[in-house]
Protein backbone atom coordinates (compact mmCIF):
# COMPACT_ATOMS: atom_id res chain seq x y z
CA UNK A 1 0.00 0.00 0.00
CA UNK A 2 1.27 3.46 -0.88
CA UNK A 3 2.33 5.37 2.21
CA UNK A 4 -0.13 8.28 2.65
CA UNK A 5 2.59 10.67 3.85
CA UNK A 6 4.39 10.23 0.55
CA UNK A 7 1.15 10.64 -1.33
CA UNK A 8 0.41 13.80 0.65
CA UNK A 9 3.85 15.34 -0.04
CA UNK A 10 3.64 14.40 -3.71
CA UNK A 11 0.15 15.90 -4.12
CA UNK A 12 1.07 19.12 -2.30
CA UNK A 13 4.12 19.54 -4.52
CA UNK A 14 2.44 18.63 -7.78
CA UNK A 15 -1.20 19.77 -7.54
CA UNK A 16 -1.99 22.04 -10.49
CA UNK A 17 -5.43 23.20 -9.43
CA UNK A 18 -6.57 23.80 -5.86
CA UNK A 19 -10.07 24.37 -4.51
CA UNK A 20 -9.77 26.07 -1.10
CA UNK A 21 -12.94 26.33 0.99
CA UNK A 22 -12.87 28.77 3.90
CA UNK A 23 -15.53 28.75 6.61
CA UNK A 24 -17.25 31.75 8.25
CA UNK A 25 -15.71 30.97 11.66
CA UNK A 26 -12.22 31.36 10.14
CA UNK A 27 -12.98 34.68 8.44
CA UNK A 28 -15.09 36.50 11.02
CA UNK A 29 -15.11 37.53 14.67
CA UNK A 30 -17.81 39.20 16.74
CA UNK A 31 -17.31 42.43 14.77
CA UNK A 32 -17.56 40.83 11.36
CA UNK A 33 -14.83 40.16 8.81
CA UNK A 34 -11.29 39.98 10.14
CA UNK A 35 -9.34 41.66 7.36
CA UNK A 36 -6.01 40.62 8.86
CA UNK A 37 -7.08 36.96 8.48
CA UNK A 38 -8.12 37.48 4.85
CA UNK A 39 -4.85 39.33 4.16
CA UNK A 40 -2.77 36.56 5.66
CA UNK A 41 -4.66 33.83 3.78
CA UNK A 42 -4.37 35.71 0.48
CA UNK A 43 -0.63 36.15 1.04
CA UNK A 44 -0.18 32.46 1.82
CA UNK A 45 -2.35 31.40 -1.11
CA UNK A 46 -0.38 33.66 -3.45
CA UNK A 47 2.85 32.01 -2.33
CA UNK A 48 1.40 28.53 -2.61
CA UNK A 49 0.17 29.15 -6.16
CA UNK A 50 3.55 30.54 -7.22
CA UNK A 51 5.61 27.74 -5.71
CA UNK A 52 5.48 23.97 -6.18
CA UNK A 53 6.43 22.10 -9.31
CA UNK A 54 4.10 24.17 -11.54
CA UNK A 55 2.20 27.44 -11.35
CA UNK A 56 -1.18 26.49 -9.90
CA UNK A 57 -4.75 27.48 -10.53
CA UNK A 58 -6.65 28.55 -7.44
CA UNK A 59 -10.37 28.64 -6.73
CA UNK A 60 -11.56 29.95 -3.36
CA UNK A 61 -14.97 29.05 -1.92
CA UNK A 62 -15.64 31.67 0.72
CA UNK A 63 -18.42 31.65 3.29
CA UNK A 64 -19.08 34.56 5.66
CA UNK A 65 -21.50 36.72 3.67
CA UNK A 66 -24.21 36.18 6.30
CA UNK A 67 -21.83 36.76 9.23
CA UNK A 68 -20.37 39.88 7.58
CA UNK A 69 -23.86 41.19 6.81
CA UNK A 70 -25.07 40.57 10.34
CA UNK A 71 -22.14 42.53 11.76
CA UNK A 72 -22.64 45.38 9.29
CA UNK A 73 -26.34 45.62 10.19
CA UNK A 74 -25.44 45.64 13.89
CA UNK A 75 -22.93 48.44 13.35
CA UNK A 76 -25.75 50.46 11.76
CA UNK A 77 -27.97 49.88 14.76
CA UNK A 78 -30.20 47.39 12.93
CA UNK A 79 -31.03 44.41 15.11
CA UNK A 80 -31.72 41.68 12.56
CA UNK A 81 -32.89 38.26 13.65
CA UNK A 82 -31.14 36.17 11.03
CA UNK A 83 -32.55 32.81 12.09
CA UNK A 84 -35.18 32.84 9.33
CA UNK A 85 -34.28 32.10 5.72
CA UNK A 86 -35.30 35.48 4.22
CA UNK A 87 -33.37 37.38 6.89
CA UNK A 88 -30.29 35.19 6.30
CA UNK A 89 -30.61 35.89 2.59
CA UNK A 90 -30.91 39.61 3.27
CA UNK A 91 -27.89 39.55 5.58
CA UNK A 92 -25.91 37.66 2.92
CA UNK A 93 -26.84 40.36 0.40
CA UNK A 94 -25.55 43.04 2.78
CA UNK A 95 -22.40 41.05 3.54
CA UNK A 96 -21.45 39.64 0.14
CA UNK A 97 -20.25 42.99 -1.21
CA UNK A 98 -18.08 43.56 1.84
CA UNK A 99 -16.73 40.04 1.73
CA UNK A 100 -15.79 40.46 -1.91
CA UNK A 101 -14.24 43.87 -1.31
CA UNK A 102 -12.05 42.47 1.46
CA UNK A 103 -10.94 39.51 -0.70
CA UNK A 104 -10.26 41.83 -3.62
CA UNK A 105 -8.14 44.12 -1.41
CA UNK A 106 -6.30 41.17 0.10
CA UNK A 107 -5.40 39.63 -3.28
CA UNK A 108 -4.64 43.04 -4.77
CA UNK A 109 -1.82 43.33 -2.22
CA UNK A 110 -0.42 40.15 -3.79
CA UNK A 111 -0.82 41.60 -7.28
CA UNK A 112 -3.64 39.16 -8.05
CA UNK A 113 -7.09 39.77 -9.52
CA UNK A 114 -10.26 38.24 -8.11
CA UNK A 115 -13.57 37.33 -9.76
CA UNK A 116 -16.85 36.97 -7.89
CA UNK A 117 -18.89 33.88 -8.79
CA UNK A 118 -22.23 33.14 -7.12
CA UNK A 119 -23.90 29.78 -7.77
CA UNK A 120 -26.97 27.83 -6.69
CA UNK A 121 -27.46 24.08 -6.72
CA UNK A 122 -29.96 24.62 -9.49
CA UNK A 123 -27.13 25.80 -11.74
CA UNK A 124 -25.62 22.33 -11.53
CA UNK A 125 -28.85 20.61 -12.61
CA UNK A 126 -29.00 22.27 -15.99
CA UNK A 127 -26.35 21.08 -18.42
CA UNK A 128 -26.15 24.41 -20.25
CA UNK A 129 -25.57 26.35 -17.05
CA UNK A 130 -22.98 23.85 -15.90
CA UNK A 131 -21.12 24.27 -19.19
CA UNK A 132 -21.35 28.05 -18.94
CA UNK A 133 -19.94 27.96 -15.43
CA UNK A 134 -17.07 25.69 -16.50
CA UNK A 135 -16.24 27.94 -19.48
CA UNK A 136 -16.32 31.01 -17.26
CA UNK A 137 -13.90 29.41 -14.80
CA UNK A 138 -11.60 28.46 -17.67
CA UNK A 139 -11.47 32.10 -18.82
CA UNK A 140 -10.90 33.42 -15.30
CA UNK A 141 -8.05 30.93 -14.78
CA UNK A 142 -6.50 31.86 -18.13
CA UNK A 143 -6.17 35.45 -16.86
CA UNK A 144 -4.48 34.23 -13.68
CA UNK A 145 -7.39 35.63 -11.63
CA UNK A 146 -8.85 33.90 -8.57
CA UNK A 147 -12.56 33.01 -8.60
CA UNK A 148 -14.08 33.68 -5.18
CA UNK A 149 -17.21 31.54 -5.07
CA UNK A 150 -20.16 31.59 -2.70
CA UNK A 151 -23.68 30.23 -2.79
CA UNK A 152 -26.05 32.75 -4.35
CA UNK A 153 -27.92 33.15 -1.10
CA UNK A 154 -30.51 35.63 -2.41
CA UNK A 155 -32.12 33.12 -4.75
CA UNK A 156 -31.27 29.86 -3.01
CA UNK A 157 -34.48 28.75 -1.38
CA UNK A 158 -34.56 25.53 0.62
CA UNK A 159 -35.07 23.10 -2.25
CA UNK A 160 -32.33 24.68 -4.33
CA UNK A 161 -29.70 25.11 -1.67
CA UNK A 162 -26.44 23.23 -1.42
CA UNK A 163 -27.02 23.69 2.29
CA UNK A 164 -23.44 24.60 2.90
CA UNK A 165 -20.35 25.61 1.03
CA UNK A 166 -18.65 22.29 1.83
CA UNK A 167 -21.06 20.62 -0.61
CA UNK A 168 -20.56 23.38 -3.18
CA UNK A 169 -16.76 23.00 -2.92
CA UNK A 170 -16.99 19.25 -3.53
CA UNK A 171 -18.93 19.87 -6.78
CA UNK A 172 -16.47 22.51 -7.93
CA UNK A 173 -13.57 20.10 -7.52
CA UNK A 174 -15.04 18.01 -10.31
CA UNK A 175 -16.29 20.95 -12.37
CA UNK A 176 -12.86 22.61 -12.65
CA UNK A 177 -10.81 19.41 -12.55
CA UNK A 178 -8.96 20.26 -9.33
CA UNK A 179 -6.49 17.79 -7.91
CA UNK A 180 -6.75 18.83 -4.27
CA UNK A 181 -9.50 20.15 -1.98
CA UNK A 182 -8.38 22.16 1.05
CA UNK A 183 -10.96 22.89 3.73
CA UNK A 184 -9.96 25.64 6.18
CA UNK A 185 -11.99 25.34 9.34
CA UNK A 186 -12.04 26.61 12.93
CA UNK A 187 -11.18 23.14 14.23
CA UNK A 188 -7.60 21.72 14.38
CA UNK A 189 -8.68 18.90 12.06
CA UNK A 190 -10.99 15.91 12.31
CA UNK A 191 -11.32 14.58 15.86
CA UNK A 192 -11.49 10.83 16.47
CA UNK A 193 -14.76 11.40 18.41
CA UNK A 194 -16.96 14.41 19.27
CA UNK A 195 -15.20 16.70 21.82
CA UNK A 196 -16.82 16.61 25.27
CA UNK A 197 -16.57 18.78 28.36
CA UNK A 198 -13.00 18.47 29.64
CA UNK A 199 -11.96 15.94 26.97
CA UNK A 200 -10.15 16.94 23.80
CA UNK A 201 -10.01 13.91 21.53
CA UNK A 202 -7.02 13.38 19.29
CA UNK A 203 -6.88 14.84 15.81
CA UNK A 204 -6.67 12.18 13.10
CA UNK A 205 -3.69 12.92 10.84
CA UNK A 206 -5.08 10.70 8.12
CA UNK A 207 -8.37 9.11 7.14
CA UNK A 208 -7.55 6.31 4.76
CA UNK A 209 -11.06 5.13 3.96
CA UNK A 210 -13.53 7.96 4.46
CA UNK A 211 -16.40 5.87 3.02
CA UNK A 212 -16.15 3.38 5.90
CA UNK A 213 -16.54 5.99 8.67
CA UNK A 214 -19.66 6.16 10.76
CA UNK A 215 -20.15 9.91 10.57
CA UNK A 216 -23.10 9.93 12.98
CA UNK A 217 -20.94 8.50 15.77
CA UNK A 218 -17.87 10.52 14.90
CA UNK A 219 -19.67 13.82 14.58
CA UNK A 220 -22.17 13.37 17.39
CA UNK A 221 -25.26 12.71 15.29
CA UNK A 222 -26.72 14.36 12.24
CA UNK A 223 -27.48 17.62 14.00
CA UNK A 224 -24.48 19.10 12.23
CA UNK A 225 -25.94 18.52 8.77
CA UNK A 226 -26.16 21.74 6.80
CA UNK A 227 -24.60 23.87 9.49
CA UNK A 228 -21.12 23.36 8.17
CA UNK A 229 -19.97 21.18 11.08
CA UNK A 230 -17.43 18.40 10.63
CA UNK A 231 -20.23 16.19 9.30
CA UNK A 232 -20.57 18.28 6.16
CA UNK A 233 -16.78 18.56 5.78
CA UNK A 234 -16.45 14.79 5.83
CA UNK A 235 -19.32 14.34 3.37
CA UNK A 236 -17.60 16.84 1.12
CA UNK A 237 -14.27 14.99 1.48
CA UNK A 238 -16.04 11.74 0.69
CA UNK A 239 -17.39 13.12 -2.57
CA UNK A 240 -13.94 14.33 -3.56
CA UNK A 241 -12.45 10.95 -2.56
CA UNK A 242 -14.97 9.19 -4.81
CA UNK A 243 -13.55 11.18 -7.73
CA UNK A 244 -10.00 10.22 -6.72
CA UNK A 245 -9.24 13.61 -5.16
CA UNK A 246 -7.74 13.99 -1.65
CA UNK A 247 -8.89 16.59 0.90
CA UNK A 248 -6.74 18.38 3.45
CA UNK A 249 -8.73 19.73 6.43
CA UNK A 250 -6.72 22.45 8.17
CA UNK A 251 -7.13 24.85 11.11
CA UNK A 252 -7.55 28.05 9.10
CA UNK A 253 -6.76 30.42 11.97
CA UNK A 254 -3.37 28.96 12.85
CA UNK A 255 -0.45 31.10 11.86
CA UNK A 256 0.92 30.42 8.38
CA UNK A 257 -1.06 27.22 8.26
CA UNK A 258 -0.98 26.88 4.47
CA UNK A 259 2.74 27.60 4.22
CA UNK A 260 3.41 25.08 6.96
CA UNK A 261 1.27 22.40 5.31
CA UNK A 262 2.83 23.00 1.88
CA UNK A 263 6.26 23.13 3.56
CA UNK A 264 5.83 19.54 4.71
CA UNK A 265 4.50 19.90 8.25
CA UNK A 266 2.01 17.20 9.17
CA UNK A 267 -0.86 19.46 10.26
CA UNK A 268 -4.62 18.92 10.04
CA UNK A 269 -6.27 15.82 8.60
CA UNK A 270 -5.45 14.26 5.25
CA UNK A 271 -8.38 12.40 3.68
CA UNK A 272 -7.11 9.87 1.14
CA UNK A 273 -8.81 9.48 -2.23
CA UNK A 274 -10.49 6.23 -3.20
CA UNK A 275 -8.26 3.96 -5.24
CA UNK A 276 -10.97 3.50 -7.88
CA UNK A 277 -12.48 6.85 -8.84
CA UNK A 278 -16.06 6.93 -10.07
CA UNK A 279 -16.55 8.44 -13.54
CA UNK A 280 -17.70 12.05 -13.69
CA UNK A 281 -21.01 10.98 -15.32
CA UNK A 282 -21.94 9.03 -12.17
CA UNK A 283 -20.74 11.84 -9.95
CA UNK A 284 -23.01 14.40 -11.60
CA UNK A 285 -25.91 11.97 -11.68
CA UNK A 286 -25.66 11.51 -7.92
CA UNK A 287 -24.83 15.01 -6.76
CA UNK A 288 -26.17 17.65 -9.08
CA UNK A 289 -29.66 17.34 -7.61
CA UNK A 290 -31.06 16.21 -4.28
CA UNK A 291 -32.95 12.88 -4.20
CA UNK A 292 -36.72 13.42 -4.40
CA UNK A 293 -37.97 10.07 -3.12
CA UNK A 294 -36.98 6.85 -1.38
CA UNK A 295 -37.16 3.19 -2.31
CA UNK A 296 -37.05 0.85 0.67
CA UNK A 297 -35.65 -2.52 -0.40
CA UNK A 298 -35.55 -6.03 1.08
CA UNK A 299 -32.54 -8.08 2.25
CA UNK A 300 -32.21 -9.99 -1.02
CA UNK A 301 -32.11 -6.83 -3.12
CA UNK A 302 -29.63 -5.19 -0.72
CA UNK A 303 -27.35 -8.19 -1.08
CA UNK A 304 -27.70 -8.21 -4.88
CA UNK A 305 -26.81 -4.50 -5.08
CA UNK A 306 -23.97 -4.47 -2.60
CA UNK A 307 -22.31 -7.83 -3.13
CA UNK A 308 -23.21 -8.81 -6.69
CA UNK A 309 -23.22 -5.52 -8.53
CA UNK A 310 -26.81 -6.00 -9.73
CA UNK A 311 -29.55 -3.56 -10.72
CA UNK A 312 -32.62 -2.92 -8.57
CA UNK A 313 -35.62 -4.93 -9.77
CA UNK A 314 -39.30 -4.38 -8.85
CA UNK A 315 -39.35 -7.64 -6.84
CA UNK A 316 -36.90 -6.30 -4.25
CA UNK A 317 -38.84 -3.13 -3.43
CA UNK A 318 -40.85 -3.03 -0.22
CA UNK A 319 -41.93 0.63 0.01
CA UNK A 320 -42.01 3.75 -2.12
CA UNK A 321 -41.82 7.14 -0.43
CA UNK A 322 -42.39 10.50 -2.07
CA UNK A 323 -43.83 11.42 -5.41
CA UNK A 324 -41.42 11.38 -8.34
CA UNK A 325 -41.18 11.07 -12.07
CA UNK A 326 -39.20 8.85 -14.44
CA UNK A 327 -35.61 10.09 -14.52
CA UNK A 328 -35.69 11.52 -10.99
CA UNK A 329 -33.02 10.76 -8.44
CA UNK A 330 -34.13 8.54 -5.55
CA UNK A 331 -32.49 7.29 -2.41
CA UNK A 332 -32.20 3.52 -1.96
CA UNK A 333 -32.77 2.50 1.65
CA UNK A 334 -32.33 -0.80 3.46
CA UNK A 335 -33.32 -1.28 7.11
CA UNK A 336 -33.31 2.47 7.70
CA UNK A 337 -29.85 2.93 6.21
CA UNK A 338 -29.25 4.75 2.93
CA UNK A 339 -27.28 2.50 0.58
CA UNK A 340 -26.98 5.06 -2.18
CA UNK A 341 -28.90 6.85 -4.90
CA UNK A 342 -30.03 6.12 -8.42
CA UNK A 343 -32.15 7.34 -11.30
CA UNK A 344 -35.61 5.76 -11.38
CA UNK A 345 -36.90 4.25 -14.63
CA UNK A 346 -40.45 4.53 -13.32
CA UNK A 347 -42.74 7.07 -11.70
CA UNK A 348 -43.44 6.57 -7.99
CA UNK A 349 -47.06 5.70 -8.87
CA UNK A 350 -45.98 2.87 -11.18
CA UNK A 351 -43.50 1.52 -8.61
CA UNK A 352 -46.31 1.34 -6.06
CA UNK A 353 -48.17 -0.90 -8.53
CA UNK A 354 -45.24 -3.20 -9.37
CA UNK A 355 -43.25 -3.39 -6.14
CA UNK A 356 -42.63 -6.93 -4.95
CA UNK A 357 -43.62 -8.39 -8.34
CA UNK A 358 -41.81 -10.68 -10.76
CA UNK A 359 -41.09 -9.68 -14.33
CA UNK A 360 -44.09 -11.45 -15.92
CA UNK A 361 -46.38 -9.99 -13.25
CA UNK A 362 -45.06 -6.50 -14.02
CA UNK A 363 -45.76 -7.10 -17.71
CA UNK A 364 -49.34 -8.06 -16.89
CA UNK A 365 -49.83 -4.70 -15.20
CA UNK A 366 -47.74 -2.28 -17.28
CA UNK A 367 -47.49 -4.17 -20.56
CA UNK A 368 -44.30 -5.49 -22.15
CA UNK A 369 -42.70 -2.18 -23.05
CA UNK A 370 -41.11 -1.66 -19.66
CA UNK A 371 -37.64 -1.72 -18.18
CA UNK A 372 -36.74 -4.85 -16.25
CA UNK A 373 -34.95 -2.67 -13.68
CA UNK A 374 -36.40 0.10 -11.54
CA UNK A 375 -32.88 1.50 -11.15
CA UNK A 376 -30.23 0.26 -13.56
CA UNK A 377 -26.79 -0.45 -12.15
CA UNK A 378 -25.21 2.10 -14.49
CA UNK A 379 -27.43 4.81 -13.05
CA UNK A 380 -26.76 4.00 -9.41
CA UNK A 381 -24.13 5.19 -6.94
CA UNK A 382 -23.84 3.14 -3.80
CA UNK A 383 -22.25 4.89 -0.79
CA UNK A 384 -23.37 8.27 -2.12
CA UNK A 385 -22.30 11.05 0.24
CA UNK A 386 -25.68 12.77 0.53
N1 LIG B 1 -23.31 31.18 1.93
C1 LIG B 1 -23.21 31.36 3.35
C2 LIG B 1 -22.45 32.65 3.67
O1 LIG B 1 -21.69 33.12 2.88
C3 LIG B 1 -22.47 30.26 4.06
C4 LIG B 1 -22.84 28.86 3.83
C5 LIG B 1 -21.94 27.97 4.70
O2 LIG B 1 -21.72 28.28 5.87
O3 LIG B 1 -21.40 26.99 4.22
O4 LIG B 1 -22.56 33.17 4.73
Image (cartoon, rainbow, N blue to C red):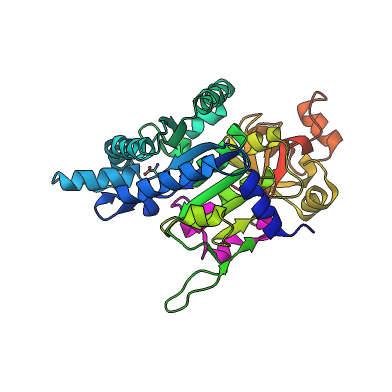
Q: Is residue 237 magenta?
A: no
| 266 in relation to 259, above or below | below
Q: Which one is in front, 59 or 292?
A: 59
Residue at the spot x=56%, y=61% of the render?
265
Position of 361 with respect to 43 (left or right) is: right
| 101 in relation to 206, above or below | above
Q: Position of residue 237 (x, y in %)?
A: 59, 50
Position of 126 with respect to 94 (left or right) is: right
Q: Which one is in front, 151 or 296?
A: 151
Highlighted magenta segment, given as a residue range: 207-233
Residue at the spot x=43%, y=36% of the render?
148
| 227 in relation to 16, above or below | below
Q: Position of residue 299 (x, y in %)?
A: 77, 55
Q: Which one is in front, 228 or 204?
A: 204
- Looking at this rendering, what residue extends furthest in the bottom direction? 198
Residue at the spot x=62%, y=32% of the render?
328
Q: Is residue 227 magenta?
A: yes
Position of 232 with respect to 76 (left or right) is: right
Q: Is residue 252 in sight in this rendering?
A: yes
In the rendered view of the protein, which quadrant contains the N terminus?
bottom right
Position of 25 with respect to 285 (left or right) is: left
- Determine which quarter of the picture holds residue 281: top right
Count of marks overlaid on the render: 0
Q: Position of residue 290 (x, y in %)?
A: 56, 39
Ligand 1: which quarter?
A: top left
Q: Position of residue 272 (x, y in %)?
A: 67, 54
- Looking at this rendering, what residue extends furthest in the left direction? 77
Q: Is residue 335 in sight in this rendering?
A: no
Amino acid sequence: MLDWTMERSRTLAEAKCLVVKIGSAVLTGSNGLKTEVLDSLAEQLARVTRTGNHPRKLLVVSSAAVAAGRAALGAHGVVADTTGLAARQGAAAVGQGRLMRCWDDAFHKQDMLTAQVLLTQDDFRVQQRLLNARNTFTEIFSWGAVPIVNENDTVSTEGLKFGDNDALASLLVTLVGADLLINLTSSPGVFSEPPREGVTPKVLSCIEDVASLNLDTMCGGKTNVGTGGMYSKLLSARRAAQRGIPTLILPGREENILLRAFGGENVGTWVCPQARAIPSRKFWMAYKAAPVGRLVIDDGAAEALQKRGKSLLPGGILEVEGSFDKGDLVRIVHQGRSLGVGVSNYTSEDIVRIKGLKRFEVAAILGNAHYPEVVHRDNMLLDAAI
